[in-house]
């Protein structure tokens, strides 16, 4: 154990060296408001009451690295906690944000940040395109943030895939579009595309293979020993690979394997939803992905229709251990696997044109 004075924060803090050799401050991470466990039910036609959703500091990862998340029980897409986690690193160099929550709660997200810093919002990185992570991009760009993301995310935003009903998706707000971009390269997988040295922390933006979408980035905070792993892993509901935006179940397996290399045993992993984990918690999830993929592949190889495969209830062995195991979540997962095990199209311009099912 060693003592170090964080003069730039005007604070004294105990610093513990973890076995990985990285510093983790005593008392951190700190969970202030745990995510809800449910079960949650919503009446037919329920509309999200945005005015009732609060954005709060739910976890502190270090004295100047906080996590923001929304209220439980009000957002049917994310009943455990509304929106996707956002993060703020703050101090004399200004604020670096990871993701922005939904557009409807942009002001509340800023207010939550203003409870701990008055610093200028300078940098924003998007972990993936979904609106619970990028919805307030334009708002935070107007606050001064320069937005970073993978090229694929920018392409998904500028030229979105058609909606499920075949209608074209609306054009994005120009200010929401990332301006500083980089690409995933399989030959340098795991290496940061961008590194920021700010507020006593070293922050790496690490582009990911197509997994949750084709434009994913994970964000590593070296000193706090934390990685924001976004949504290729979740522990509330079944896995979601957004295949029209380039996602892939096989890519999720690659993403899990990469985290095994990047994270130490004590590294805190922050999913976009659900509770915080360590890298060993990814392993049962990986086993489930492999098991379900093999079973679906066998059934589809026997000529079974999607309807037949859904009726086989392949997630049954996992339901008892999976929070948020709604029928909708199971069916979405099994459908993704069914679509991926044969004739899976490549990523083009950040998207996949999914073929019609037999
Ligand atoms: Zn999310």
Image: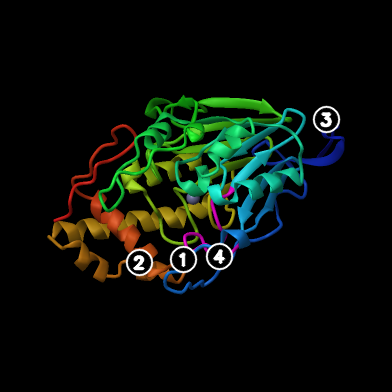
Specify whether residue 267 is in view. Answer: no
- Give the mark toward the camera: 1 or 3: 3
Residue ID for mark 4? 74
Query: In front: 199, or 191?
Result: 199
User: In which quadrant of the rendered image does the N terminus lie?
Assistant: top right
* Mark 4 residue crowding within 10 angstroms, few (<14) / some (14–19) / many (20+): many
How far apart are the two marked residues, 1 and 2, measured between alpha carbons?
10 Å
Question: In the image, which residues are magenta?
Answer: 71-85
Residue 259: x and y in percent read: 49, 41
Residue ID for mark 2? 315
Does the beta carbon at disc 4 come under 8 Å from ligand 1? no
Residue 248: x and y in percent read: 33, 45
For the image, the number of numbered tags is 4
Residue displayed at 42% across by 32% down: 154
Residue ID for mark 1? 322
Q: Identify the image quadrant of residue 255.
A: top left
Query: In front: 103, or 320?
Result: 103
Q: Main secondary structure of the magenta part?
A: loop
Q: Earlier in the sequence, mark 2 or mark 4?
A: 4
Do the residues under discs 2 and 4 have CB atoms within 8 angstroms? no
Do the residues under discs 4 and 3 have CB atoms within 8 angstroms? no
Q: Is residue 353 above or below residue 307?
A: above
How far apart are the two marked residues, 1 and 4, measured between alpha carbons?
20 Å
């Amino acid at each position: 154990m060693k003592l170090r004075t964080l003069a730039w924060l005007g604070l004294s803090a105990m610093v513990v060296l973890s076995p990985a050799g990285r510093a983790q401050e005593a008392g951190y991470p700190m969970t202030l408001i745990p995510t809800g466990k449910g079960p949650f039910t919503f009446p037919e036609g329920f509309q999200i009451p945005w005015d009732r959703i609060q954005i709060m500091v739910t976890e502190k990862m270090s004295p100047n690295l906080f996590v923001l998340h929304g209220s439980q029980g009000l957002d049917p897409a994310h009943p455990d906690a509304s929106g996707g986690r956002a993060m703020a690193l703050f101090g004399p160099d200004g604020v670096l944000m990871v993701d922005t929550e939904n557009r409807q709660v942009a002001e509340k997200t800023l207010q939550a940040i203003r409870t701990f810093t008055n610093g200028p919002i300078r940098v924003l990185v998007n972990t993936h395109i979904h609106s619970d992570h990028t919805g307030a991009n334009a708002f935070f760009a107007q606050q001064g943030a320069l937005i970073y993301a993978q090229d694929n995310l920018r392409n998904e935003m500028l030229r979105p895939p058609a909606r499920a009903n075949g209608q074209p998706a609306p054009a994005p707000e120009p200010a929401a579009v990332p301006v500083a971009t980089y690409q995933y390269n399989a030959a340098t997988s795991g290496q940061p595309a961008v590194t920021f040295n700010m507020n006593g922390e070293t922050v790496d933006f690490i582009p990911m293979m197509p997994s949750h979408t084709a434009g994913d980035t994970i964000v590593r905070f070296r000193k706090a020993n934390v990685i924001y792993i976004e949504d290729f892993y979740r522990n509330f509901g079944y896995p979601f690979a957004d295949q029209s935006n380039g996602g892939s179940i096989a890519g999720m397996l690659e993403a899990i394997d990469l985290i095994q290399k990047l994270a130490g045993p004590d590294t805190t992993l922050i999913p976009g939803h659900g509770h915080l984990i360590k890298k060993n918690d990814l392993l049962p999830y990986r086993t489930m992905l492999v098991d379900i993929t093999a079973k679906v592949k066998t059934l589809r190889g026997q000529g079974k229709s999607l309807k037949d495969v859904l009726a086989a209830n392949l997630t049954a062995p996992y339901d008892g251990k999976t929070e948020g195991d709604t029928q909708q979540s199971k069916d979405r997962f099994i459908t993704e696997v069914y679509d991926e095990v044969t004739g899976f199209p490549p990523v083009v311009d950040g998207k996949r044109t999914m073929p019609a099912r037999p």
